[in-house]
Image (cartoon, grey):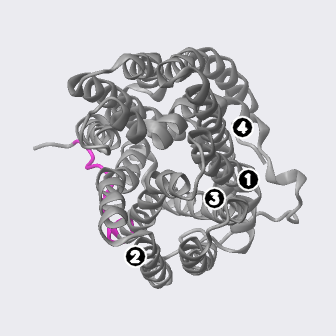
Amino acid sequence: MDARPQPEPLFTARFAGLWLFAFVTFFSAFQLLPAIPFRILELGGSKAAAGWFLSVYTYASAFAAPVMGSLADHLGRRRALVAASLLFIGFSLAYGLVTNFPLLLVIGAVHGAIWSTILASSSALMSDYIPESRRAQGLAWWGLAGNSAIAVAPPAGLWITHTYGWTALCIELAVLSALMAIGGTRLSETRPHRPETRLTLAEAWDWRVTLVALALGVIGFGYGGVTSYAAILSIERHITPASLYLTVAAIAVVFVRVFFSHLADRVGPKRILYPALAFAPVSFAVLAFAQQRWQLIVSAAIFGIVMGIAFPTFSSYILAHTDPRRRARTFGSIVWAFDTGIGTGSLAIGAIGQRFGLTAAFIAAAAISCLSIPIFSAGSRRLARGGPAA
């Protein structure tokens, strides 16, 4: 008779409900983000200007995330999700009406700030749903909600835009936001206890988490370039379909998380995380010189494997060294570092690509991502010495 204890259940009804909520959220966002550079070009903007939107969007998300996460910890994470979803309806409709580029950037900034509320609050809720013994695996499957959406959203968004027009896409995004708001009301919050301290701007930042999360931020630099320019690079090099890179990367993420996500719980997160960080520069270097479809696919597959392993394993490590009552703040600090990298990468790769070409731009991304291992090594030692943050 097998006396080994059975693993705690992971795939519960509440897990499925929040997973579906995240899928719809990311499906909406990743229809917008790859399509809006073409909208900006249609309005007369340059390649560099096309990257400005994602930079503004992600910078706003990054700098708002710790504050929004702390606010969600104090006021309720489910309440924050519903409020953000309702606001998304207005943003979606505004994108369809606005033709002035500066005003489009303003809308993107506010939208990005509210987007960080969903990222921090939903991740904190899910971390409460997942058994501690299966944390890395649970976070990996949780992340599949976004990655599965990314696999299908870019071609869907581009198809709707090119077939029915920009306005039709924006109306569809508004409908999805309404569904998110309805779904958010049905989510449960398992940790009613909240931080006892008053909410202040100073306590919104967990700098120990932020510093070690910069290891993901330097990879996010290339991620921002991929999101904004992979489709444009494909068109310039006559590689079809234009959405191929993001789709292949998302499929690779799904594969590695389904079959290998349990390893970090068994052998420890660091043993899995270091090899993943080491391959990030390889993916960007291959993309820089890709002239044929198979080369683009190789780059996308490597990048997908890196992200499939790195983000949930990194988050699992962080959660073991932070306060459970402030998990939305913790995820907000992670979002701050990662989205700062994405926004900087989108802006810088656009500017480099405009002046020197996208080959030089992605070589720069490969070089910068080499910093991820030394940053994590130094930051994780400091985080581990400090114990859970108050």
Alpha carbon separation for disc pair 1 and 3: 8 Å
The spot of residue 337 in percent (x, y) is: 67, 39
Counting residues from the N terminus, which is met first, the one under dot 1 or under dot 3? 1
Q: Left or right: 2 with respect to 204? A: left
Counting residues from the N terminus, which is met first, the one under dot 4 or under dot 1? 1
Q: Could you tell me if the residues under marks 3 and 2 are in contact, i.e. CB atoms within 8 Å?
A: no
Please identify the residue farthest to the left as the structure is shown: 1
Alpha carbon separation for disc pair 2 and 4: 39 Å
Q: Name the residue under label 1.
A: 66
Q: Name the residue under label 3.
A: 116
Considering depth in this image, is 96 or 301 the residue closer to the camera?
96
Residue found 27% across the figure and 34% down from its top: 260
Displayed quadrant of residue 207: top right
Residue type, numbered disc 3: Ser
Q: Left or right: 293 with respect to 194? A: left
Residue type, numbered disc 4: Thr
Magenta part of the protein: which range?
4-16
The spot of residue 31 in percent (x, y) is: 41, 60
Q: Could you tell me if the residues under marks 2 and 4 are in contact, i.e. CB atoms within 8 Å?
A: no
Counting residues from the N terminus, which is met first, the one under dot 3 or under dot 2? 3
Alpha carbon separation for disc pair 3 and 4: 15 Å
In which quadrant is the N terminus drawn?
Answer: top left
The spot of residue 101 in percent (x, y) is: 67, 60
Say which mark, if any, is on residue 210.
Answer: 4
Which one is closest to the eye, mark 3 or mark 2? 2
Counting residues from the N terminus, which is met first, the one under dot 2 or under dot 1? 1
Q: Magenta segment: does it hold 10?
A: yes
Mark 3: which secondary structure? Answer: helix
Residue type, numbered disc 2: Ala
Considering depth in this image, is 259 or 52 the residue closer to the camera?
52
Residue 274 position (above or below residue 118):
above
Counting residues from the N terminus, which is met first, the one under dot 3 or under dot 4? 3
